[in-house]
Image (cartoon, rainbow, N blue to C red):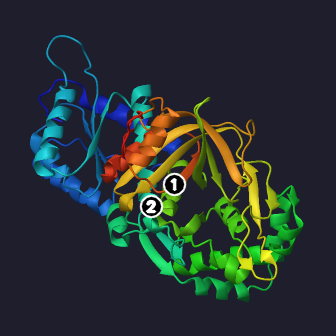
Amino acid sequence: MQPNFRGDKESVYKRCVEGLKELSKELGFELLPYPKLLSNPDQAKKAKEEIESQGVDFLLILNVSFASGYLVQTLAQTDAFIGLWSVPEQSDSGPLPQNSFCAMNLNASLVKLVAPHKKFKWFYGYADEKPFRERFSITIRALSALKNLKDKSIVQIGGHAPGFDSLTYDAERIREIFAVHIKEVPFETLKDLMQKQKDVEDIVADLKRRHESIDSLSERTLVPAAALVRALREICETEKCEAIALLCWPRFRSELSMVPCASMGYLNDEGIVVACEGDVLGALSMLVLKLISDHPAMLFDVVSLDLKDESLLFWHCGVGMKSYSNRLFMKKHFNPGPYDPEKGWLEMAPVSEIVVDPMPATVLRLTENGTKAFVFEGEFLNDVKPSFDGSRGWFSSLKDHAGRKLGVLDLVNTLMCHRLEHHFAVVRGHWAKHLVEMFQWLGVELLETIPYSENSVC
């Protein structure tokens, strides 16, 4: 503030703080209102020291009136994320009472001067008003997800699937952007842990409870499936990880005579992120969606298109989850293998088959070591059209990250021309706005739609 502006600065500040207190209860953040209004550089320096000592994550700089430009130049040099806030004038004629908006405008230019690479978000209006509340709530969820992502670990077990070399990654680059650590664990470590599991009847019983039916081949693989669940839990506990990128084929088939799909779906429902085929960026995409939405995510391929109703079919082998369907069926894997000279192609199990319930959902693919992100939204249709065995769902009403209608051919052209990897993380609910903000804070590029045409060349 600046003392010589005539507006009632104390009442403005009081109303703003009271509004934020109500929002803190609703949105679940801790509020630390500064006890004084700042008007000179020495006060700003003292406030900066306190902000840093408190470990503040998000500093909301409110102009109750115009203020010296020196104040924001000091405050903007904290490590906290920055918000710039102004409020409407207390009267609409006569001498200007506050000059709050102009002050915020000045502050934006000064942040560029003293911290050119630092990002900020602006806010206008009172905290008890709808426009502020909607804008601020997105920020709180995005920054909470960012804070909760910091220093998390992803474990890749066994490398990536053979030939899927687009799933390689640069662990250091990912850490620089997301503050997430990648660790590698040999497949042999997992095998040894599985073989040491003795009493897994509690997990077997739970797997049985969760599925409406279990075929005979899956019944015979329940114990190793349960042993895998417990072994992956132990690896997460030992490595202190939040997510696993698991080499799910071919070694489970050739060395353990099973597939891990049902166990992976079970763990995702439980809260441990497990991605297929050793896909580290797929696991990170799933983890980001989980933190932004408070729901577990699934990893899918796109396997079919319907141009008549502008929909696409998400599918994977059988990592079905109770979070996405009330009906789970444990079955053999659709694709047999490996080949035995005497017995022929060997059938493998267990998978958890589902058709996703009707629900809104958001799709994310992080690519190029997390420097870029593709986001879109839509609606699952339920079991209204034929689909393939496995975990799957037809997805329609497509919209891009900005809420614009997205044609299915435009979507396909975009996937192809941005050369995206073939896995897409999907989560219940519409979260594109929150993801967009999160990626803006991180400096992650949001990939735009590349419209389809008959002569599209990628």
Identity of the residue drawn at 22% across and 51% down: 118
Return the x and y of residue 235 as percentages of the image width and height: 59, 79
Q: Dot 2: within a 10 Å radius of its alpha carbon, few (fewer than 14), some, or many (20 or more) residues? A: some
Q: Residues within 10 Å of mark 1 (few under 14, many from 20)?
A: some
Q: Can residue 40 be seen in this view?
A: no
Q: Which of 92 and 437 is in front in this view?
A: 437
Q: Which of 411 and 184 is in front in this view?
A: 411
Indicate whether 349 appears above or below 144.
Answer: below
The answer to which quarter of the image holds residue 316 is: bottom right
Residue 287 sits above or below residue 136 on the image: below
Q: Name the residue under label 1.
A: 291
Can you see residue 17?
A: yes
Indicate whether 369 appears above or below 254.
Answer: above
Q: Earlier in the sequence, mark 2 or mark 1?
A: 2
Instruction: Point out residue 18 in the picture as x, y percentages from the top left corner.
Output: 41, 36
Q: Please state, as top left, top right, bottom left or bottom right, where the N terminus lies in the image.
A: top left
Q: Are marks 2 and 1 in contact (CB under 8 Å)?
A: yes
Viewer-nearest residue: 412 or 192? 412
Q: Nearer the viewer, residue 257 or 298?
A: 257
What numbered label is drawn on residue 149? Answer: 2
Distance between the Cα atoms at labels 2 and 1? 7 Å
Disc 2 is placed on an element classified as helix
Occupied quadrant, residue 9: top left
Under tag 1, what secondary structure?
Answer: helix
Image height check: is 131 above or below 182?
Answer: above
Residue found at the very far top of the displayed protein: 93
In x, y percent, where is residue 146?
Answer: 41, 55
Q: How many marks?
A: 2
Query: Please, what is the three-letter code of the amino acid marked with disc 1?
Result: Leu
Is 366 on the left or on the right of 310, as rendered? left
Which residue: 44% across, 73% down? 182
Looking at the picture, which amino acid does disc 2 mark? Leu
